[in-house]
């Protein structure tokens, strides 16, 4: 069964350094999401892509975070400079376009294993 | 704005027993979707069950079922015949109709013991 891939699985960095996370969604999934999950909380959407376009980045701290999905396939989330409060799990998810294989709006989002970031 | 509340940070249940996880939500929308996601330790989050608000019938997936009370804005998950593999964080989530933005609760950590 196809899965969402993320790397690295774990990242330790010092504050003020730059970090980058990579996500490869399930093939054919047009929509890609990046979530941040702080310990003890539920995931919070950072950015959503439809193909290569940003649909929602209202919760993305744009002064230090950036995300891209240049060819509408895989995606990179970057933090520069990292701060202590950025320590969290960063989850990537994807979902098929409505109509594809019977998919509907509100259909399942498929999550990757996440990247656990620790900022020292 | 929509909010999702899970008031049970931790629950435990003995293997083969039944457990119910609670979830309430707040919205002014009439059409939406509700989800329960499972996040096992060190593994990815997977969908457990999905409910469409316009459907009165409660969703069921094998040992998992929901009690959807639209007027009360309540969406509880019942796990029957609990298994050790059910040990995980469980997140309740809300999605407004015609969007695909999930809003998650804070989660309930479920421990199934032998």
Image: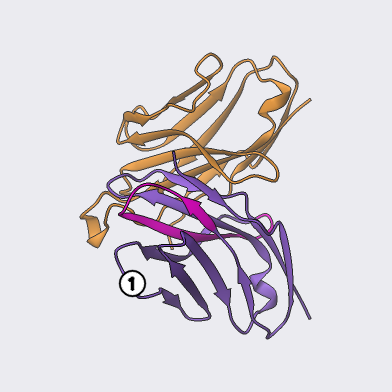
What is the letter of the orange chain?
Answer: A
Image point 60% across, 16% down: which residue? Answer: A80
Would you name the residue on which mark 1 appears?
B56
Q: Position of residue B20 (x, y in %)?
A: 61, 72
Residue visible at 59% across and 64% down in the picture = B22
Q: Please state if A88 lies on the left or on the right of A55 as rendered.
A: right
* Quarter of the figure with the N terminus of chain B: top left
Query: Residue A13 or B72: which is nearer the viewer?
Result: B72
In the drawing, does residue B7 fall left or right of residue A74? right
- Indicate left or right for B93 with B11 as reference: left
Residues in magenta?
Answer: B24-42
Q: Colour of chain B?
A: purple
Residue B30 on the magenta segment: yes
Q: Position of residue B18 (x, y in %)?
A: 64, 81
Question: Which chain is home to disc 1?
Answer: B
Q: Quadrant of the C terminus of chain B?
A: bottom right
Residue located at (65% from left, 56% from top): B7
């Amino acid at each position: 069964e196809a899965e969402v891939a993320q790397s690295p699985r774990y990242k330790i960095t010092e504050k003020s350094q730059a970090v980058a996370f990579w996500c490869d969604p399930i093939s054919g999934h047009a929509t890609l999401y990046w979530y941040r999950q702080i310990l003890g909380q539920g995931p919070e959407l950072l950015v959503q892509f439809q193909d290569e376009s940003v649909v929602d980045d209202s919760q993305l701290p744009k002064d230090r975070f950036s995300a891209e999905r240049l060819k509408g396939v895989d995606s990179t989330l970057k933090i520069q400079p990292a701060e202590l409060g950025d320590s969290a799990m960063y989850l990537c998810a994807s979902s098929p376009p409505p109509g594809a294989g019977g998919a509907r709006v509100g259909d399942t989002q498929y999550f990757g294993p996440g990247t656990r970031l620790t900022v020292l | 704005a929509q909010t999702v509340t899970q008031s049970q940070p931790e629950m435990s249940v003995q293997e083969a027993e039944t457990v119910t996880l609670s979830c309430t939500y707040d919205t002014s929308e009439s059409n939406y979707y509700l989800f329960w996601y499972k996040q096992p330790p060190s593994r990815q989050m997977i969908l457990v069950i999905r409910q469409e608000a316009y459907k009165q019938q409660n969703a069921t997936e094998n040992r998992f079922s929901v009690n959807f009370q639209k007027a009360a804005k309540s969406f509880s998950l019942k796990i029957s015949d609990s298994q050790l593999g059910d040990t995980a964080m469980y997140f309740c989530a809300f999605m407004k109709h015609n969007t695909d933005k999930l809003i998650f609760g804070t989660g309930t950590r479920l421990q199934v013991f032998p």
